[in-house]
Amino acid sequence: MRSLIVTGGAGFIGANFVHYWSNRYPEDRIVVLDALTYAGNQASLESVQDRPNFRFVHGNILDRTLIAKLMREESTDTIVHFAAESHVDRSIHEPDAFIQTNVIGTHNLLMAARELWLDSDDAPATHRFHHVSTDEVYGSLGVDDPAFTEQTPYAPNSPYAASKASSDHLVRAYHHTYGLEVTTSNCSNNYGPYQFPEKLIPLMIVNALTGQPLPVYGDGSNIRDWLYVEDHCRGIDLVIGKGKLGATYNIGGNNERRNIDIVRQVCAGLDRIFAENEKLSDRFPDAPAASGRKTESLITFVKDRPGHDWRYAIDATLATEELGYAPRQSFETGIRLTLNWMLENEHWWRAVMDGSYREWISKNYSDNA
């Protein structure tokens, strides 16, 4: 039995990981540590809240005293570190928070782990610090460039990517300098349940259902590799269980697509679902599909953001060959699952879309129209 602290476990990927791990390893102890910033939502953990092996702690990874206290109380032997400021647009407008959380916060966790796992008389027999990172640390690719591998030099182009690159280097350094047992995974763009509706796919879905414009940067030709979030969680599980200490593994979805094609596929999916279920027109009367119009009529091209990386692509060969990783969802099946989840969980996304969120979206998109 393992005792885990999952940082950022009320966020999008973290909450999905908690659900995944709780179902796969019900005997393990899981402590979620989350600051509940705008993107953290305790309601995303509602189905696991009452499990005897689960504990939620409202706290910040900037508080090293709290981290050490929790690790001692829970006899923690595994940290899975998701907690991060993660939105590129926000990092452009508000970079300070990204340095604090992503760099200083990660270092706090590493210092506490070193103290309790390496310098303590009652340290666990084995331990693991798994750090969840992003493909954005590698920079941008041209149309004919090979996909990112674990040997691709870092070239971050946004404050967000730079802060994640810094945290990656700190994790690596604590392994090579102190012997901390670490692994790192760099993932491509995730999508799926519980994703905060500022990211591309949930933003398009919510705006389409409420009859709002679907803002697309530039001409929409930017390319990303899309990874269904449960496939990401499965990949992390493999890295923790089978990964080499000190190693980094890329986890991708084998789904390179242009942003405009993603948006159009979301639109087509909604049109199809509305045609199959007439009751949706009553629930979402402002959606174009409710009146027989094409959802893609809402697409609005807006001014491109500064430093917008053109293409990301993940080569997950190492994880496939060493760990047996392979995504189970194609984009077609994953987006259908995501659309159905959003339609079945309207209460969830309406609850997170408070006034401050709407104000931020309006400021950062409508000014560029």
Image: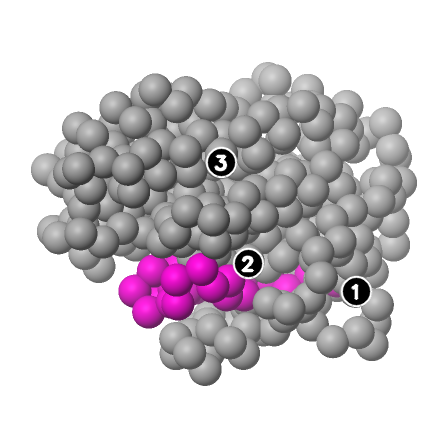
Q: Position of residue 169 (x, y in %)?
A: 58, 48
Visible in this render: residue 157? yes
Residue in view at x 47 percent, y 63 percent: 247
* Quarter of the view holding residue 281: top right
For label 1, count other residues whose C-alpha is less than 10 Å away and answer few (under 14), some (14-19) or many (20+): some
Q: Nearer the viewer, residue 284 or 79?
A: 79
Q: Position of residue 232 (x, y in %)?
A: 45, 60
Q: Position of residue 154 (x, y in %)?
A: 70, 56
Q: Nearer the viewer, residue 224 or 332?
A: 224
Amino acid, disc 3: Thr
Sequence-wise first label, 3 or 1: 3
* Quarter of the view holding residue 74: top left
Q: Is residue 297 magenta?
A: no
User: What is the spatial separation of the Cα atoms under label 3 and label 2, in whole angstroms?
Assistant: 18 Å
Q: Tell me if label 1 and label 2 are in contact, CB under 8 Å.
A: no
Q: Say which mark, if any, is on residue 141.
A: 1
The region drawn magenta spans 223-251
Amino acid, disc 2: Cys
Drawn side of residue 348 relative to residue 68, left or right: right
Image height of 266 relative to 107, above or below: below
| Mark 3 lies on residue | 106
